[in-house]
Image (cartoon, rainbow, N blue to C red):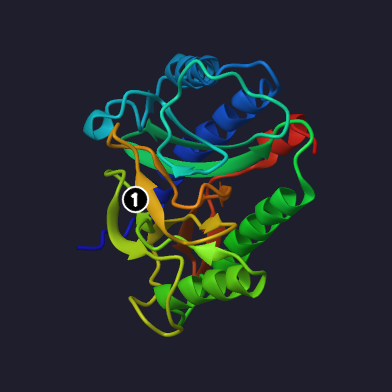
Amino acid sequence: MVYYKTDSEIELMRQSADLLGRTHGEVAKHIKEGVSLSHLDKIAEDFIKDHGATPSFLNYNGFPASLCMSLNDVVVHGIPNDYELKDGDVISIDCGVYLNEYHSDSAFTYPVGNVAPDVMQLLKVTKDSLYLGIEQVKANNRIGDVSFAIQEYAEKHGYSVVRELVGHGLGRSLHEEPEVPNYGKRGRGIKFKNGLVIAIEPMINMGTRNVVQDNDGWTIRTRDSKPSAHYEHTVAFHNDKAEVLTTFKYIEEVFKF
């Protein structure tokens, strides 16, 4: 069942999303060579709790951290550990905040130091595909229009789209209906209706779209070990138009590349 949010519920989600954006900004200040993934996770957890909220991912179905930190060939759900970032890495940081009894969810992929030009292009195309998907969140469109826009753009640039993992609705639950695939056909799926809130999150691979799961039961990585990128926003269809509730502005204020 799809849960459509009232104006007051969207306002509560807007507050959750703002704290999430500021959490990303705090983490972004520390993205550099020599910093461990576990240290970045602690920064996020402390910041969220200090602001009266709860990390959405911590203990969710047993996930042991506040951030999903996915390094290089890891697509999503990487578990923070003592690995220290080094020159040439790319790291996707996915974070969720639970505030006012509502979740928000967003992700950003960072380059660390000097990253190969072809990998930087993967990051750019993935981020661009997110916004092309968001442009399709409009009256009379359907979920499939978002999916098609992302897939067409990514594949036009020679990349592949992960099929096993998709975007989703969210609200009082971290994962609600509908699913929001990053592949599909125009005109398919439910039509946008005021109050629908979804997480759009293209996961784009440089090589094959096929993925494998590590023995930890969480980490999803590319089968060919080539890099992957992941960007995500929480988006509400509200007053007959898209409103991006989450933001990257706090990241962009402190992390330059």
174 shown above or below 151: above
Identify the residue at image location x=33%, y=76%.
190
Comparing 50 with 154, the one in front is: 154
Comparing 47 with 216, the one in front is: 216
Identify the residue at image location x=41%, y=73%.
143
**SS of the residue at dot 1?**
loop
Residue 223 visible in the snapshot: yes
Kind of residue at disc 1: Leu
Q: Position of residue 192 (x, y in %)?
A: 40, 73
Relative side of 8 to 19, left or right: left
Q: Position of residue 248 (x, y in %)?
A: 64, 42
Comparing 75 with 42, the one in front is: 75
Position of the N terminus by quadrant: bottom left
Relative side of 129 to 179, left or right: right
Identify the residue at image location x=34%, y=50%.
170
Residue that extends furthest to the front in the rendered view of this protein? 224
Q: Position of residue 114 (x, y in %)?
A: 79, 35
Mark 1, Cα crowd under 10 Å, few <14 / some 14-19 / many 20+, is many
Q: How many marks overall?
A: 1
Residue 136 visible in the snapshot: no
Position of the C terminus by quadrant: top right
Residue 56's image quarter?
A: top left
Comparing 143 with 147, the one in front is: 147
39 shown above or below 20: above
Q: Position of residue 252 (x, y in %)?
A: 73, 38
Identify the residue at image location x=49%, y=55%.
201
- Mark 1 lies on residue: 170
222 shown above or below 78: below
